[in-house]
Image (spheres, grey):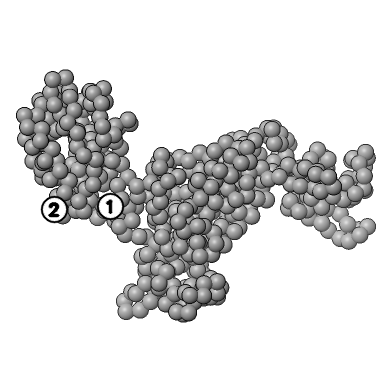
Amino acid sequence: MVPAGVCAQVTSPQLQALLAAGRGADVELRPEATTPARLAETLVAFANADGGVILVGVDPRSGKPQGLSDPEAALDRALQAALATDPPLIIPLPQVSEAGEKKVLVVTVPRGLPHVYSYKGKYLLRQGVRNQPLDPRQLRRLMMERGSVSFEGLVPDGARLDDLDWDKVRHYLSGLEALSRAGPEEALLHRGCLAQDDGGLRPTYAGLLLFGREPQRWVRSSEILVTRYAGTKMDDRFVKEQIRGTLPEQVRRAEASVASNMRHEVLLVGLERIEDPEYPVDVVREAIVNAVAHRDYQIRGDEIRILLFSDRIQFYSPGRLPGHVTVENLVDERFSRNETVVQILSDMGFVERLGYGIDRMIRLMARAGLPAPRFEETTAGFRVTLFGRGTSFVSDEPDAHGWHHMGVNERQEKALEYLAEKGRITNREYQELCPDVSAETIRRDLADMVRKNLLLKIGEKRATYYILK
């Protein structure tokens, strides 16, 4: 990528640092006499990678400035080179800077450009100090990443119309009067869920992910793994759920799974019992929808992962940020890797088409008195972390069975410990464990643990007892 701190206006210290670093993955040194063709090849290679800087008027071997005898002519050659690429490369105006008594032209290629670039039919990528031709596989991947070719719009081999669940299609269209008038097939064709292929209509990857009978048959890793750990680190005490199905089904089930595993603070306001969730439910929903809508579905062998710890939730989505979007401009910029998926989820009410909720997540976390979400790019993906109140909410010290993370009180912990040992518990046995509380409190505690999916109620009236679920 472009070296940290380098922008269109390069200061003398920044220029000295670039010269000291020498040629590399993001720095190229060229003499004044370099041709527009040589410049264009390096511009393309940087643009298809993570950006970079070309210093014109420098000896490539020694790294020492030679200077420019005609800065205007050097600037003109750089602009010719940028316009000679396909598509023409839009870059900051090159700048003439001072390196001691020598003048050097600084040509900056920003990171995150929206297209795949070539020069005279050659697609190049910066690797080390060389501009290497892209092989067909690299070119296809880059085109998909940049949006030149959409994976979701491709038709998988063997896919047929009856691989779609048309009841789900009709249910979707029932809420869209204008679109439903065209008929199911024409409506899905318009939305990008079907494509003309070999003279007929066939479902695209997007169509199969959104309405397929067996979505994971076509994209095996298109699933969500929700894992709840007892403490602040991964260990061997956890509860997990593998969520499959269509993307809308996954969003609903993942939200329910996270909500059921979140701790709740119980408040008594007058005679009303209010449960305050550990994290704003709307923020959790937004994070799940964003992960599903914007993940890179061509990455195989990796699923969306939601990890719940006692002090935070992490949402990991395969695929780095698409197009020109970076962690720095995430709140303001918009670029969708999966336009069809985003549109359909928007039609269903999951996401706003023109704004993907990042700024809303930040506002809602602040309103709840919680830290702002952390947004990070990893080597091959994107991660959102929500931080909770930690020990100020509920103790995160692990107990023998990890009951605390379910938001239970001390009485309920006693009951659960009893159950772990005895296998079952009755109202009377619970009352004997907690003799200082009323029968109504005992009843509410047991009903609360059934609601939290901790206990299963067996029998009726006096024959009722409870077991661990």
Q: Which residue is mark 2?
A: 120
Q: Is residue 29 left or right of residue 242?
A: left
Q: Amino acid at mark 2?
A: Lys
Q: Quadrant of residue 24?
A: top left
Q: Amino acid at mark 1?
A: His
Neighbor class of circle 2 (other Cα within 10 Å; few <14, some 14-19, many 20+) is: few
Residue at 25% in and 26% down: 11
Q: Position of residue 191 (x, y in %)?
A: 42, 69
414 to 213, vertically: above or below? above
234 to 448, vertically: above or below? above
- Who is closer to the viewer here, 60 or 398? 60
Query: Can you see residue 237?
Result: no
Q: Mark 1 or mark 2: which is in front? A: 1
Q: Measure the C-alpha gap from mark 1 to mark 2.
A: 16 Å
Q: Is residue 277 left or right of residue 294?
A: right
Neighbor class of circle 1 (other Cα within 10 Å; few <14, some 14-19, many 20+) is: many
Residue at 91% in and 59% down: 461
- Who is closer to the viewer here, 84 or 117? 84
Q: Is residue 430 left or right of residue 95?
A: right
Check the picture and name the quadrant holding the N terminus.
top left
Q: Which residue is mark 1?
A: 115
Q: Position of residue 451 (x, y in %)?
A: 76, 53
Q: Position of residue 207 (x, y in %)?
A: 45, 68
Q: Quadrant of residue 10?
A: top left
- Who is closer to the viewer here, 311 or 8? 8
Residue at 57% in and 36% down: 371
Q: Is residue 45 left or right of residue 344?
A: left
